[in-house]
Image: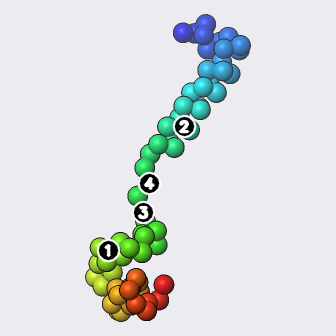
Amino acid sequence: MKMFFNNSKLQHPFLITISLLIVISFAFIPSRPDEGMFPLSDIKNINLNEKGLKISVDEVYNPDGVSLS
């Protein structure tokens, strides 16, 4: 192993390959919606009244009538 890491011809491609694999692997980690990133159609499932919202959820988003959005 010592010979492999001391050889400057092989060290750079090896490091580049490992770095690319690490970066690409992060692209496949799914992200979870966080604050403000929920679709409006799912806003009824969040329980905003428990989190301090003082108006009804239908006033925030109502696809069949008048709402804030």
Q: Which residue is mark 2?
A: 24
Do the residues under discs 4 and 3 have CB atoms within 8 angstroms? yes
Report the Cα–Cα distance between label 2 and label 4. Answer: 15 Å
Marks 2 and 3, the one that precedes in the sequence: 2
Amino acid type, mark 4: Ser
Name which residue lies at 44% across and 54% down. Answer: 31
Amino acid type, mark 3: Pro
Where is residue 62? Give x, y as percent.
39, 85
Report the Cα–Cα distance between label 1 and label 4. Answer: 17 Å
Marks 2 and 1, the one that precedes in the sequence: 2
Q: Which residue is mark 3?
A: 33
Q: Secondary structure at mark 3?
A: loop
Marks 2 and 4, the one that precedes in the sequence: 2
Where is residue 28? Give x, y as percent.
47, 42
Q: Which residue is mark 4?
A: 31
Direction from residue 12 to residue 26 in the image, left or right: left
Q: Residues within 10 Å of mark 3 (few under 14, many from 20)?
A: few
